Image (cartoon, rainbow, N blue to C red):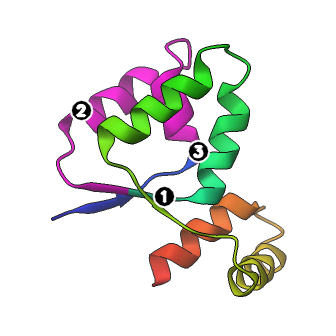
Amino acid sequence: MRTWLIDTGPLVAYLDRDDPEHEPVATCLAQFSGQLCTTSAVLVEAMHFVAADRDGPGLLVDLVEASGLLIHESTQASQLRQAARLMKKYADTPMDFADATLVLLASN
């Protein structure tokens, strides 16, 4: 089974029909057969962005449930430390906390 890590941007674009990336993301996800994975940090970040729309948080939850999105914990002390190290290392990129948790998940 194929596994894809999904970041905040595609989650938000999928839910926001006005987002320029909505159609490509929706098409890509509709054609995907496999397991979608993310981290709790990504979902917190996505929830923040979709909250501007009154229905956004509920739609995000619906997407999580319907897709079977596998959510990995990312806020234990050791994970926070590893993420902070990555954020410092890639500060010139920059890498935010949610990005760092996906890099850590990918390396496991």
Residue that appears at 67% across and 15% down:
53
Magenta stretch contains residue 14: yes
Tell me where residue 86 appears, x and y as whole percent. Answer: 73, 79
- Up the image or down, 108 lies above or below 20; here it is below
- Callout 1 crowding tier (Cα within 10 Å): few <14, some 14–19, many ≥20: many
Q: CA distance from mark 3 to mark 1?
A: 9 Å
Identify the image quadrant of the N terminus: bottom left
Mark 3 or 1, closer to the camera: 1
Q: CA distance from mark 2 to mark 1?
A: 17 Å
Residue that appears at 70% across and 31% down:
49
Q: Going by the image, does 2 lie left or right of 66? A: left
The residue tagged with tag 1: helix, strand or loop? Answer: strand
Q: Which residue is mark 3?
A: 8
Identify the image quadrant of the C terminus: bottom left
- In the figure, residue 3 lies in which quadrant? bottom left
In the rendered structure, which disc, 2 or 1, sits on the residue that comes first in sequence?
A: 2
Q: Which residue is mark 1?
A: 38
Q: Is residue 70 visible?
A: yes
Give the residues drawn in magenta, as a range: 8-36
Residue that appears at 58% across and 44% down:
8
Disc 3 and disc 1 in contact, CB within 8 angstroms: no
